[in-house]
Amino acid sequence: MPREKVVAHYDVVIIGGGAGGLTAGIYCGRARLKTLLIEKSLVGGLATYTNEIENYPGFPEGTTGIGLMKLFESQAKKFGVEFKLTDVKSVDLNGEEKIVETFRNIYKAKVVIIASGGRPRTTGAANEEKYLFDKGISFCATCDAAANTDKTVVVIGSGDAAIEEGMFLAKFAKEVIVSVIHDEGKMDCNEIAKEAALNHPKMKFIWNSVVHAFEGDDHLEKVVLKNIKTDTLIPIDCDTCFEFIGYLPNTEIFKGKIDITKNGYVLVNENKETNVSGVYAVGDVTEKFLKQVATAVGDGAIAGFAAEKYIAESEIFEEQILTQDLTVSYVYNAVDADSRSYLPTVEQFELENNIKVNRIDVYKSTGLADRLGIDNFPSIAFIKDKKVIKIIVGLPEKSELIANM
């Protein structure tokens, strides 16, 4: 008989242990939420593949990706975040309690934060599959640079990652040949990296080219490029080919569960909320302008804070607002002078009629207002038997409040 899966309960489950997921964990752990982070491979994510990080604030001399992510992990553990190194098989994000299922366990949580990141994009050229997994095609210069000392390597791509990692490879390799799809002199990287690469004595560029095929016996021996303007084939003998042509989001298990773009990225708002209540997404798995450690950290901070707010509001909503008895909620924005001036009327109504009135300020969060179905402020909601029975928009006279009791 199959083994019955162990069920465990958490406040927050984070799927993915990159910079965004770790930061979310730090915020949730520090808020004393019971938090679990699930990572299927390497804690730190793609940042661990970067040998040098020079643009992360607070490290004027630079740092390594592995070193920086180890600090993130240590800080998360300090605040009580639990880690599980396993793969998520399925999720059920409907309802108040979310379900995250792995091979051996079922985790139930009030909040799920998706930080599953992405994986390297491949070229799709002939024979590519044959040379993946340590047979000549690599996606990690940090991992394989030393093994290519005094050898010839090919780099595919011209973005920041391709050029910066290409220059790192040049510290070890005899020659770095870069295939660029654009016309001569045009690259997708920043201007500083471009200038440094073009002036590097070990780096050679093949312009207007894409990969046509990979060749070799048990190990890669040759990359055949094709000129996209003339269709001329350009065979290059090499020891390793490094592909840096972008990433694909790891969102397969979330399709049909949350809103995802046609390119597979999770759609979120400025608070990192998905279209499903209690589900957030951060980092490279989301549709965003810039994908860097610094921006992933910002995402994680927002989601971690939002998760704490969501859980706190859920408790208030269930315990104070949705009651069997008749209650009233005054929903307002504290920056609005008229709304503030109405507070004495609310207090007087509460005292004279011996009825509970909840004051809900939407200045920092509209979460409770959203749950009540209110999007106009100020408004007053009457709730009985755990249902909203009446909403008055504006600032009614006290007599109108009494009439709706």
Image (cartoon, helix red, strand yellow):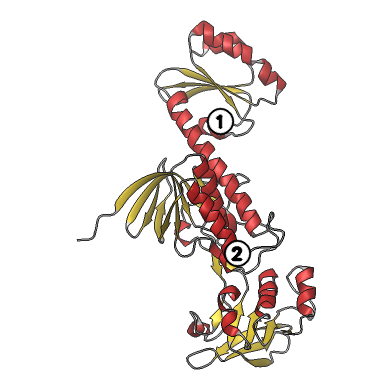
Which one is in front, 64 or 245? Answer: 64
Residue at the spot 59% in from the left edge and 56% down from the top edge? 283
**Front in this rendered view, residue 43 or 15:** 43
Residue at 53% over, 50% down: 75
Percent coordinates x, y for residue 19 in the rendering: 57, 56
User: Is there CB contact under 8 Å for labels 2 and 1?
Assistant: no
Q: Residues within 10 Å of mark 1 (few under 14, many from 20)?
A: many
Disc sitting over residue 385 in the figure: none
**Which amino acid type is marked by label 2?**
Gly
**Amino acid at circle 1:** Ala
Residue 369: mark in rendering: 1
- Which one is in front in this view, the residue at disc 2 or the one at disc 1? 2
| Residues packed near mark 2 inside 10 Å, few (<14), some (14 to 19) or many (20 plus) | many
- Please say if 364 is above or below 17: above
Image coordinates for residue 138, horizontal then vertical, percent: 56, 78
The one of 370 and 246 positioned closer to us in this rendering: 246
Residue 15 position within the rendered picture, expressed as x and y whole percent measured from the top left: 47, 55
Q: Is residue 42 above or below residue 31?
A: below
Please state, as top left, top right, bottom left or bottom right, where the N terminus lies in the image. bottom left
Direction front: furthest residue: 61
User: Outermost residue, left direction?
Assistant: 1
Q: Is residue 38 above or below residue 383?
A: below
Q: Is residue 355 left or right of residue 268?
A: left
- Name the residue at 39% across, 57% down: 90
SS label for mark 1: helix
Q: Which residue is mark 2?
A: 65
Give me the C-alpha separation between circle 2 and circle 1: 42 Å
Q: Is 88 on the left or on the right of 251, as rendered?
A: left
